Structures are given as C-alpha cells and as structure tokens.
Amino acid sequence: MKEFLLIYRRDAQSDTIQISPEQIQAMMKPWQDWMGGLAAQNKLVDRGNRLAGDGSVVKPNNVVTNGPYVELKEAIGGYSIVKAKDLKEASELAKGCPILAVGGTVEVRTIVAMEN
Amino acid sequence: MAEELIPHLFRTEYRKIVSVLGKRFGFDQLEVAEDIVSDTFFIAAKTWGLKGHVPANPTAWLYNVAKNKAVNYLEHTQLFDHKIAPELKREPRSSEETDIDLSPQNINDSQLQMMFTVCHPSIPVEAQIGLSLRILCGFGIDEIADAFLADKDTINKRLFRAKQKLREENVKIGLPGPVELESRLQTVLRTIYLLFNEGYYSVSHNTTLRKDVCVEAIRLCHMLVENASTNKPDVNALLSLMCFHASRFDARLDENGEQILYEEQDTTRWDTDLIRRGEYFLNLSASGNKLSKYHVEAAIGYWHTIKDDTSEKWESILNHYNQLLIIEYSPIAALNRTWAISKVHGREAAIAEAKKLEQLTDNHFYFALLGELYTGIDNHEALQNLQTAFDMAKTTSDKNTIKKKIDKLVV
C-alpha cells in the first residue's frame, strides 16, 4: 500500500459567495458520506483539512502577493491522504469525491516517503 | 449465610483493601498487599463458618483484621530496616508511620490512583485488562480465565509478567501530573472500553460473569467522573455509551447465553433506567471542542435506544458511523455502517458498498452481512454467503446464529 495526496480544486470565485450554516451543513454531508466510505475500506489515512480562501504567495526577492489565484481559475480548497495499492486505485477512490459534482477537480499524487 | 456473604464481600471489599495497602506499601510490595487481603478473607471464611455466625459489621471486621496484619507487616519490615541500617538515628516511632487509613475517602483515592497504575502504557493492553479485573474489580483468577476463555496458568503468567514489568519501570501508585494526565487518561479509558467489550461481546456463555464485567467497567468509569481532575467530556461520553449498550444486555441474550439480534429483541426488556443514565452522561459529555470516538459511539448508542424505526434514526446512525470511521477504522464499524446504508438507501446500495470492503473477506461477519442483504433479493447468493460465513465462523454461538438464517432461507 502506498499513500496518495488528494488535492481538491474548485472555482476560486465560489469563495466570495456568502453561505449560511445550514448550507455549510448540507455541503458537508456528501463529504462525510464519501469519506466515511473511504474510511470503511480502511483507505483513509488522514481526512486532511479545508483551506480558507485567503492566502499569499511569497516569491523570490521577498515579493509577497496577496492571493495566488488572480490568474488562476481554480484554487486548492482542501486535501486528504488516502492509501491504495497504486495510482490507478487511488484515482478510482477519487471518483466519488463531491467536489466533482460542483465542477471541481481532484489531483491525485503519489506521496514519496522521506528517507531521513 | 457466610457462604453467600463472603464471595459478595470479596467482590466489593477485596479491591478496596488491596488498593489502600498497595498504595501504603508501594507497588513493589503489591503482592504482599494481595496476600494479606486474601489471608484476611481466608480467616473470615474460617472463623465465621466455625462460629456459625457473622459479626454485626462484617466489613469493619475485615478492615480490622487486614489493618492489624498490615501494621504487623510494616512493623516487622521497619524493625528489619532498623537492624540492617544501624547508622540511622533512632527516631521515635509515631503511630502515623504504621497507620492504615481505610476511610472512604482514602479508599476512593487509592482505587483511582491504582487505576492509573494498572492501566500503564508500559504493559500490553490484555495485561492491563487482566490486572484491572484482578486488582480493581476483585475477580478471581478462574473468573478472569473464564472471561478470556484462557486457562488459569496463562492468566497467572500474564499478571505476573505485568506486575514485574511495572516494578521494573518503577511505576508509582498515584495520579499522573497535569501534563501527563490527558494522555494517561486516554489509556485508562481505552482499557475500560475494552474491559466493557470483553464482557459485552465475550464468547463465554457465563452470562452472569459477562454482565459483572460490564458493570465493573461502568463502575470504574463512574469513579473517574466523580473525581474533579478526571471528570472530562470524553469520560462522560464513554460512561454514556456503556450505559446505552448495557441497557440491552438482558434483551440481547437468550436463556442459553446466545445472542438475539438487535432487530429481534424484545424492547420491553431494555433497561430504561440505564437508558436514562446514558442520556444524563451524554448531556454532560457535550462540552469542550473535542469530538472523541466515545462521543460518536455514545450518539450511535443513543439512537439505538429509540424504538421507532424512523428514517431520521437510521440517517443519524449512518452519519455517526461515517464520523466514527473517519476518526478510527474498525471492522465492526465498517460492517455496521453498511447495515445503516441498507436502512437508509436500500439493500442494493448497501450491497454495492459492501463489495468495496475487500479487507473484510477474512471476516465471517462480512459474509453473514452479505447473506442478510441478499435475502429476498437473490436468495441463491444469500445462501452462498451465509454458507461461507457458517464455514468460517469459529464459535458454536456464531455458527448457531448463522444456521438460523440459513434455515429460514431454505424453508
């Protein structure tokens, strides 16, 4: 079994829309169902975290810009770590991700363990 | 009368005196403490039986005898110490030095401290459970062997090695400091949780013993709740979940000690008093911002005490199983989640989810569940799965439960 990082990307614009706690609750449910399914297969290593909309990018010569997404359509909304036997299976696991239903994408990357 | 009274007193008083003496002597002298208390009960059995009557206050009688023996022991060792250490200045011996405090407060404190000693992370969890049953719950070695379905020799060895290890590690009888408390408390909670499961899910047919183990686990957790420094939200959550589960103890076993499935239980046999206690502690657990697995399991336990088979009930149960699995994977939670899916989204959906659980194909409960899900949809498939489950099951009790399902299908 290898570990894979799932990176959830979605439309950067959606961060600016105000949503109610009830809407958040309704949005969280499919995530919970999906992750519960991964966990039931004992393939969820770390549910990971969501990322807030704001951020900055530090560039060479100490140049700091606010928000990395001015020129990008999609921003990283969160990440999780799963385990699978290969990239193919990890991608298979990602197919049920709720971000896909709202036009987002999941990037699946093999984690290479550090060898101290 | 003595024949009935002594085993009862043994169960309630052995652990108290052992904890107090153990605390007083130090952990390295724990066996001396155990011997003194065993001896005390032996004398009680002899004297009470011989005289044909029991003293007016049997507990006080036991405390007195144990106290005298302990004082004797202390004086002897002190004498010895003084002899081999003649350079020590002669100090007037105060009565405090050899006083044995068997007040309710000290009994309680000593037991609580002993709990942290016995549930020490340096020894394996089976040893923690074994020592808990012996020292914190006053179970006999034969009872512990019966509960673990092991022979007495194995249990004796296990306890001996555990005590040796604790001595080597120089573990003190006492509450850990504030920094350590949280992590040590987690070990204690896990041991109590597993102790409870040992009683609740044991394959032993000794129903009384199994119930006693559950009651003891609840009692230990209750002691933690009653102490200010250990009265944490997750402790209340654990207590709540054990109350909810225990409320179905009688309803889930038939007269032969075999399991009656949840769906087939006589709900009038659910213990409403325990359900109310479970709700009480569930409310108390709802503070702080940490959602432990005990909280989630308590919530699942709560919904199982609701008799009506509503969609709200099963949706909540499914959500909580998702939460629980995200916190910590376990095969039983994965199977129960699948069952909850069948109640919420139907059997086909549940079968599709079950098919993904490749890691459980060495588990007979997995095939029993598939058999159950296929029943009425594809009876041929159902029968095959149940047959696989039957072949894989190891205990007669499990085989019988599966056999009943097969018989229903074949008719």
Image (cartoon, rainbow, N blue to C red):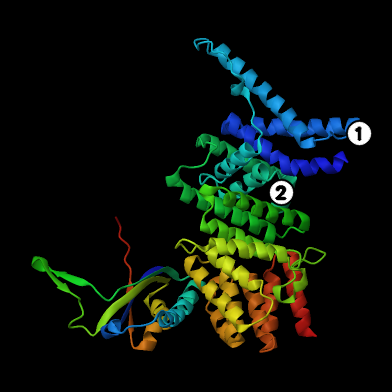
Is residue B363 left or right of A49 when viewed as pictured? Answer: right
Q: Which quadrant is the C terminus of chain B positioned in?
A: bottom right
Work out whether mark 2 precedes mark 1 in sequence or the reverse, and give the earlier one: 1
Image location (x, y in percent) of residue B205:
77, 59
Residue B344 visible in the shown view: yes
Picture quadrant where residue A114 is located:
bottom left
Crowd tier of the residue under label 2, counting other residues whose Cα lies within 10 Å: few below 14, some 14–19, many 20 or above: some
CB atoms of marks 2 and 1 within 8 Å: no
Q: Amino acid at mark 1?
A: Gly
Tag 2 secondary structure? helix
Picture quadrant where residue B113 is located:
top right
Tag 1 secondary structure? loop
Indicate the chain on which mark 2 is placed: B
Image location (x, y in percent) of residue B207:
77, 58
Q: Amino acid at mark 2?
A: Ala
Q: Residue B138 shows which numbered tag?
A: none
Crowd tier of the residue under label 1, counting other residues whose Cα lies within 10 Å: few below 14, some 14–19, many 20 or above: few
Q: Residue B145 shows which numbered tag?
A: 2
